[in-house]
Image: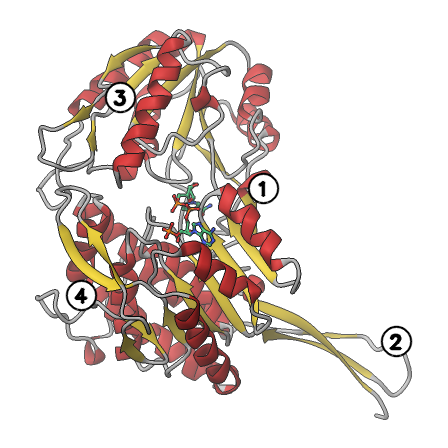
């Protein structure tokens, strides 16, 4: 996700060129590298080759409980740490991430598949998020409120919540973690994190660097597992876990909210999207095409804020389609480590099946495949799918309602501004939306009409550590990043001082 590259603090950072020091094959609990209690493991595979990369512990309820114990024990001391000391550890962690960016990117690309250049952008964004959180921690201000009675003073303070249970997805195996863990730890909480089954290695590498940065034992715990349900139920079922922070599908988000209800945990939910990308007649064609490529095909279309429905107005439709198709046909597919590759493999066979089924449904309902359309074996055994363009799409197709999560661009023609706002909002999701226009009045009207948490006007990349990232409707609630980033990880306390 988007970022500014930061210079590492030289004194404390030593980049190493081998992967070994960051390629961990144990869970990280209470500051130690541990196996699952029952010694079970699961394999991590490279989606570009289907080769096994590593085996990591398949943690179950007992291991998760041990991690909660560690986080709960570490909390009282960590919350009392001076904010400047917490911020210093976080800044050191961020600097170490930047100093090891090549190794981290290689690990990320190997387990997730995205091109190395994208991995580096993600990792830089992760470091920037941690640094941002460190800075925000120093400004966790409260208020003084004019007293409502004689001889009294009224103050508010922000306090950490306690143990945070965090669960993250595979599509951004680094930055989805730093977005949660950075603010959580900065605010004085401790964390038990379960990374996605497909991508635990980036999480463990992050923990190794946090350890090196001097994060005390128990403050961050990483529970690798192929038993998501068990770990989720253990985290949500434990009263000592006071907050659940989840990024993933809306379906699992709903479940975790329900499971958190009996103990009334604070929850943050970063869930699925169905982004409209609207091109009006008056748009700058070249910029709109470049924006559509960037928004649709980043991470092979596997992002929550990806353009899912491309609405193109009638007056620019033919021209846009021609130019967009040309650009799509130039995209370079291949393994993420290969130079110049822009599209890597999909994460697994299920992803190929889903994209294929959505395409079959769309073509059965009137869309034509203009380019691409198939899984390809030209790049070896991996899960590669050709960059694909289909048109015309309509609201009856499954891909108008479901996340495609693959490199398939579906073009929906439209006539009027009112019509397209209505159609863009015709979804249960509300994460990100984009549109291209040169008309200032329209820019305001449409931005205000779109029921989304984030809107890009003539801009395809909206992420940064400095903005409040998050959705509305069934895309969830809570914000990650921006000036509010520590609010979701702290509680407001009011104190009345009498007898003054
Ligand atoms: P997912 O199936 O919901 O999985 C996300 C995480 O939840 C993984 O760690 C997964 O573990 C775990 N999980 C699955 N079932 C669980 C359960 N019953 N209890 C507890 N944890 C459970 O989603 P995904 O396929 O990995 O990720 C793609 C989704 O994430 C898309 O919908 C995308 O839009 C969304 N996303 C949203 C944002 C945002 O900021 N709004 C950002 C990125 C992605 P396993 O991996 O072991 O199954």
Calculate the distance from the C-alpha at mark 2 to the C-alpha at mark 1: 37 Å
Q: Looking at the image, is mark 3 or mark 1 earlier in the sequence?
A: 3
The image position of residue 143, as x and y in percent, is: 69, 73
Q: In which quarter of the image is the C terminus?
A: bottom right
The residue labelled by disc 4 is 23
Toward the viewer: 360 or 133?
Answer: 360
Q: Which of marks 3 and 4 is in front?
A: 4
Quadrant in the rendering for residue 192: bottom left
Mark 4 falls on what kind of element?
Answer: loop
Toward the viewer: 313 or 428?
Answer: 428
Mark 1 falls on what kind of element?
Answer: loop
Q: Looking at the image, is mark 4 or mark 2 earlier in the sequence?
A: 4
Q: Which of marks 2 and 1 is in front?
A: 1
Q: Looking at the image, is mark 1 or mark 4 earlier in the sequence?
A: 4
Quadrant in the rendering for residue 217: bottom left
The residue labelled by disc 3 is 388
Instruction: Please tell me the numbered disc located at residue 285.
Output: none
Instruction: Please tell me the numbered disc located at residue 148.
Output: 2
Q: Looking at the image, is mark 3 or mark 2 earlier in the sequence?
A: 2
Calculate the distance from the C-alpha at mark 3 to the C-alpha at mark 4: 35 Å
The residue labelled by disc 1 is 472
Q: Looking at the image, is mark 3 or mark 4 earlier in the sequence?
A: 4
């Amino acid at each position: 996700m988007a970022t500014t590259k930061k210079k590492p603090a030289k004194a404390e950072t030593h980049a190493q060129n081998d992967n070994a020091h960051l390629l961990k094959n144990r869970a990280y609990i209470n500051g130690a590298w541990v196996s699952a209690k029952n010694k079970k493991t699961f394999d991590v595979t490279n989606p570009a080759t289907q080769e096994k990369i590593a085996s990591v512990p398949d943690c179950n309820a007992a291991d998760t409980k041990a991690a909660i114990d560690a986080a709960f024990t570490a909390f009282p001391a960590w919350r009392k740490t001076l904010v400047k000391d917490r911020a210093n550890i976080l800044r050191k962690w961020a600097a170490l991430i930047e100093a090891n960016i090549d190794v981290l990117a290689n690990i990320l690309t190997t387990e997730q598949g995205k091109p190395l250049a994208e991995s580096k952008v993600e990792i830089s964004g992760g470091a920037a998020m941690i640094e941002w959180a460190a800075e925000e921690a120093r400004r966790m201000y409260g208020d003084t409120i004019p007293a409502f009675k004689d001889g009294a003073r009224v103050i508010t303070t922000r306090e950490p919540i306690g143990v945070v249970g965090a669960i993250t997805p595979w599509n951004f195996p680094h930055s989805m973690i730093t977005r949660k863990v950075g603010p959580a730890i900065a605010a004085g909480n401790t964390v038990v994190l379960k990374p996605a089954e497909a991508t635990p290695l980036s999480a463990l590498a992050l923990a190794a660097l946090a350890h090196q940065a001097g994060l005390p034992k128990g403050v961050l715990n990483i529970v690798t597992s192929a038993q998501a349900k068990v770990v989720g139920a253990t985290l949500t079922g434990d009263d000592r876990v006071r907050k659940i922070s989840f990024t993933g599908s809306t379906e699992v988000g709903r479940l975790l909210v329900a499971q958190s209800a009996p103990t009334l945990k604070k929850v943050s939910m970063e869930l699925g999207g169905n982004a409209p990308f609207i091109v009006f007649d008056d748009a700058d064609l070249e910029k709109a095409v470049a924006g559509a490529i960037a928004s649709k095909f980043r991470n092979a279309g596997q992002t929550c804020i990806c353009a899912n429905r491309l609405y193109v107005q009638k007056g620019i439709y033919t021209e846009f389609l021609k130019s967009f198709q040309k650009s799509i046909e130039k995209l370079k597919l291949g393994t993420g480590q290969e130079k110049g590759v822009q599209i890597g493999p999909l994460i697994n066979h299920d992803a190929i099946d889903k994209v294929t089924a959505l395409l079959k449904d769309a073509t059965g309902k009137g869309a034509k495949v203009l380019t691409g359309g198939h899984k390809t074996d030209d790049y070896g055994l991996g899960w590669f799918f050709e960059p694909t363009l289909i048109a015309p799409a309509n609201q009856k197709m499954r891909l108008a309602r479901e996340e495609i999560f693959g490199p398939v661009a579906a073009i929906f023609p439209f006539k009027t501004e009112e019509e397209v706002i209505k159609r863009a909002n015709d979804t249960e999701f509300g994460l990100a939306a984009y549109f291209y226009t040169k008309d200032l009045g329209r820019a305001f009207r449409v931005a205000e009409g779109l029921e989304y948490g984030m809107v890009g006007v003539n801009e395809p990349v909206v992420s940064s550590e400095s903005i409040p990232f998050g959705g509305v409707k069934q895309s969830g609630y809570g914000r990650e990043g921006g000036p509010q980033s520590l609010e979701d990880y702290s509680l407001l306390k009011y104190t009345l001082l009498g007898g003054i």
